[in-house]
Amino acid sequence: MAMPIVSPHPADQSIAPESPRATAAWYALALLCIVTLLSQLDRHITTIIVGPLKQEFAMSDTMFGLLHGYGFAITYAIFGIPFGRLVDRKNRRNIILFGLLGWSLLTSLSAFAGSYTQLLILRTGVGIGEAVLGPAAYSLIIDFFEPHKRGRATGAYYIAMSVGSGASLLLGGLLLSQIPAAGLNLGGFQNLEPWRLLFLFAGLPGLFACLLMLTMREPTRRGAVANNVASIRDFLGYVWRNKGLLVRISASGTLAAMAGYGAGAWAPTLLQRNFGLSPASTAWPIGTAMIIGSIAGTLLGGAMSDRMIKRGDLSARTRPMLFGFITYVPAAAFGLMGSPLFAVLGFGLLLFSVAMVQSATPLALQEAVPANMRGQIIALQYLILALVGIGLGPTLVGVITDSLFKSGAMLGWSIFTLAMPVALIGLLICGFGLTEAAYRKGNINHRE
């Protein structure tokens, strides 16, 4: 018989520190948001330069899907679990600091890639650096904030991810509109093409952000005895015993991410192919829709979650997922719209839906495990998210276009073919598998 999910023992509560001052907590959150915004900028900058990259390295849609998806996601996933264990035992601020330095340097070095293979290797390196961020950041948020504020705090952090995704398009579009088509001469480098300059400039802000991270203190861990980190065996055993609820939470967030990353990676290209728009002109509407939709979905989901926690609703952390998938169903058809305006509005609705689901997932998982497993549960979720969401989403869209429809003009149908089944499956999981009854089988304590 499966053991119920339990919260940290009451004895742990006696050693829990007082809540950090609100100013220190919100300052730390602001720094985490800045770093996360930069990570998304480095990760998504490739989406508006699909054309130049394909021309430079003779890439197919499938090859670009691999570059943007699995080229980043495989190492992101592989290093997630060991980094998650580090998060549960070492200084989390320093872990983020070294990761930030690494992925920023590798992003800038991508400007000098001489082949598809070289660029792919550099992007895998970016994935290694960014693998430390999610587990460390969410673990810090849990320790900085009281339970009734965590929904909004994690929501603000997720907004930084979304703003970073959209900002990468806005900044890229701005740079492309200002850089001469022939490129620029930077010192001894002759005529760096615009796409190379995007990589170069995208990595530079992260080097300055390393200095800001030094001003953030490391909080005392809530509900955990120092150095009492669960072994991998104990952690995996706990997950297995309580797999029913944990798998449903994880699956909901992962499915939303798969279609969300798939749509986001190809949305600018969709506008270019369907409506003849230039890369620079597609960046602004897609980036703006991404930012607005994600912010709205995250804020609504976080406020809903915190309000339900105060009422004692056991399924408070996962209820926003159900509402997210309800709106996901009509949004899945955004790529079939007959005008760029409706396509952009539909894309914004899809990102609203994804944000409600994804922003709820990490907090729901962390509050469902003991304190000494929080870094590892997020690392495990990020491993799944990387392989199935970040990696498979963009790749599947490219494969569907090349193999099933055999025409780049059918990109909208490729996105729909991926997104609609995901929306319906997610709706079923959240509607019937993440209810009050499912939570009553465990003992979730949101006060730790």
Image (cartoon, rainbow, N blue to C red):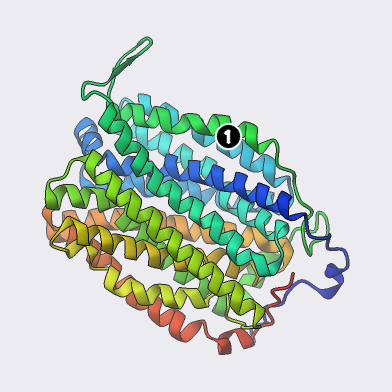
> Is 86 rendered above or below residue 419?
above
State the image quarter where residue 228 is shown: bottom right
Q: Is residue 426 left or right of residue 263?
A: right
Q: Is residue 443 left or right of residue 40?
A: right
Q: Which residue is mark 1?
A: 209
> Is 370 rendered above or below residue 59?
below
Which one is in front, 446 or 365? 446
Which one is in front, 304 or 400? 304
Residue 47 image position (x, y, % from top left): 31, 44
Residue displayed at 71% across by 56% down:
144
Residue displayed at 21% across by 38% down:
51
State the image quarter where residue 46 is shown: top left
Asked if residue 400 can be seen in this view, the reply is: no
Residue displayed at 58% across by 34% down:
209
Q: Is residue 83 left or right of residue 18?
A: left
Residue 22 image position (x, y, % from top left): 73, 55
Amino acid type at image mark 1: Ala
| Quarter of the rendering occupied by the C terminus | bottom right
Q: Determine whether the residue tagged by mark 1 lies in a helix, strand or loop.
A: helix
Residue displayed at 30% across by 38% down:
173
Asked if residue 309 can be seen in this view, the reply is: yes
